[in-house]
Amino acid sequence: MQYSKKLIALSIAVATLTGCAIEPTPIKDDERLAGMLKDQAEIYSKQEPITAPLTFYDALARALKYNYDHRLTMMEAVLQDTQLDVSKLNMLPRLAINAGYIGREDQLGSSSVDYFNQSRNSQLTQYSTSQDAQRGVADLTFTWNVLDFGVSYYQAKQQANRVMIAQERKRKVVNNLIKEVSNAYWGASLSDHLLPKLDPVLKQAEHALELSKTVEVNRLQPMLSVLEYQRSLLRIIDQLKKLKADLAVAKPKLAGLINAPVHSDFQLAQPKQTPEPPELKASMTELENLGLFFRPELREEMYQERISRDEVWKEMLKVLPGLTIPLSANWDSNSFLVYNMWMEAGARTTFNLVNLLAAPKMWKSAQTQVEVAQIRRKALSVATLVQVNVSYQQYKKALEGYHSASELNNVDQSIFKVITDTTESDAGSELERIHAATAALASQLEKEQSLAEIYSALGNIYSSIGLDPVEGNIEHITVRTLAVQLEKNLDHWYKGEFPKLPNAPKTPEAPKATPVVKAAETPKTPTAPAAKVATTTVSSSAPTAPASKATKQ
C-alpha cells in the first residue's frame, strides 16, 4: 500500500508539471508549405471544367456553385442546423450511468457511546465495521429539472431562428454575387471584344502625336490648331490607357468570382451584334415594396427580434423556483448490506432569492433588446428604400447614357468613314484619319461600356430588392441546368415580371402603418447626389467623355 501511495503522488506531480510546461508553439515552415500545397490542389478541384465559352448565366451558375463565399454561408447554415439538433437534445432529462471502485488502506471500524452519557467511560470497548475495505458502486440516475427544461426550450427556439438567420445571410451573399458577377462579366466581355482593337488605335494615336510635334517644330500649320490637336490627342491617349488598365483586371475579377484559376484563358461568349439593353417596366412603388418584403437584412432583423422576445421569457423563467425530480437505480458490492441493489426517488426545489433582486434589471435589458431590434429594422427599411431609389436612378442614367453614346457612335463612325474615303483619294490628311479613328473607337468603347453599366445597374437593383434567382438545393445539379434556370428567372426580371406579394390584411390601419409610397416619394432631393456618386465610382465611363469633344474639334 505504501508503494501505491508513492505511485499516486508521483502521477499527480508528473501531471502537474506537464500542465505547467505547455507553451505557445508556432506552425513550422514545412507544415505551412504542406498546407499551402494542399489548399492549392483542392481550391479548384471537384468542379466541372470550362469546356465552352461562358455566357453570363453560365458564369453566374458557376459562381453560385463554386464561389467560396457562398460555400462558406452554406456551411454556416449547416452548422446552425446542427446546433439546433444539439439544442433540442438539451431539453431532454439527464440520464447518467456512474460506476467506480472504492478502496481504503485499513478497513473502516468504529465504536459508539451512549447518547445521553457521551463521556469516554461510556464508550463501548468493541469496535465494529459495516463496510468492506474494497467495494464497487454503480448507479443509473434519471434527473429532470423543470426550470432547465423551460430555459432549454426557449434556447432551442432561439437557435431555430438563428438557423433562419443563416439562410438569410446566404441569400444576401447570393444577391451580392449577382451584382458582382454582372459587373465583372460585362467588363470582361467588353475587354475581350475591344482590347484587340484598342492597341492598334493607341499606337496610331501615339504616332499621330509624334507627327503633330514635327508639324509644330517645322511651323507647317498654325500653332494654335496644332496645339489644340495635340491636346485632344493626349486626352484620348490618356483615356485609352486608363481604359486598357481597367479592362485588363476585369477578367481576373470574374475568374475569382466563378472560382476559376486567375491566369486561366477561358473564353466568354460574344454575341454577333450588340444586344439592345433591357428596359425595366416595374414601377418605383413596386420595387420599393419588393425590397421591403424580400430584403435579407430586414428578414434577419425580424428573426433577431424573435430571439430577443424569447430572451425575455427565458429571463422570466430564471426567476421562478426550480423543481428537480431524481430517480435512480443503485448497486453497491458492500457485503454488509442486506440489499445490494435498490431504487431511489425524490423531489427537490431550489429558489434563488438573489434573482428576485436582479429580475427587474434582467427584464428591462431583454425588453431593450427587442426595442433595439425594432429600431434597427426600421433603419434598414429606410436604407433599403434609399438603395432601391438610387439603383433605379443609376439604371435610368445608364439607359439614357447608352442612347446618347449610340447616337454619338453612329456620328463618329460616319465621320471616320468619310475621312477614310477622302484619305484614300488623297483628299485628306493622315493626322485627321488617325484622329477620327481614335475618336470612333472611343465612341464605340463608350457605347459598349454604357451597355455594361445598364446590366450593372440592374444587378444593383436586384441586389437592393433581395430576390432569389433560384430556389432549392443547387449542390447536385449541373452548371448547365442551373444556368438554364437562371436565364429563365432573370429573363422574367428583365421584363419586369417580379414575384407577387401576398395580399395585405384588409384592416383600415394597415395602410397607415406602412406608408411605403410617401417614403418613396419624399427622398427625391438625395437622389441627385447619389447619381454623382455613381458617376465617380464607374471608373471606365469617365475617360470616354472627352472623345466626343475631340471629334467635334
Image (cartoon, rainbow, N blue to C red):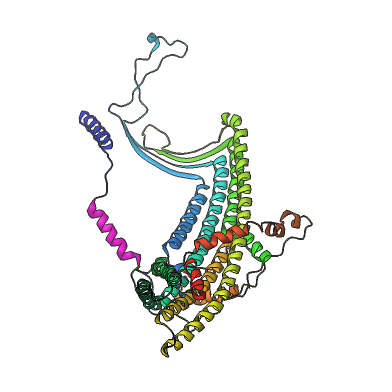
Total marks in image: 0
Residues 9 and 372: in front is 372
Residue sitting farthest toward the bottom: 425
Instruction: Report x, y in % for residue 405.
Output: 54, 75
User: On the image, which quarter does residue 518 sit in?
Assistant: bottom right
Q: Considering depth in this image, is 85 or 501 the residue closer to the camera?
A: 501
Q: Give 520 or 302, whichever is nearer the viewer.
A: 520
- Range shown magenta: 28-44
Q: Is residue 324 left or right of residue 437?
A: right
Q: Residue at x 30, y 65 (%)?
A: 41
Against 390, residue 333 (above or below) is above
Specify the quadrant of the image occupied by residue 110: top left
Image point (60%, 38%), residue name: 365
Question: x, y percentage for residue 349?
Answer: 57, 33
Q: Quadrant of the N terminus?
A: top left
Residue at 36% in and 34% down? 335
Q: Is the magenta stretch mostly helix, strand or loop?
A: helix
Q: In the displayed structure, would residue 376 be above or below residue 545?
A: above
Residue 454 horizontal/vertical position (percent): 55, 71
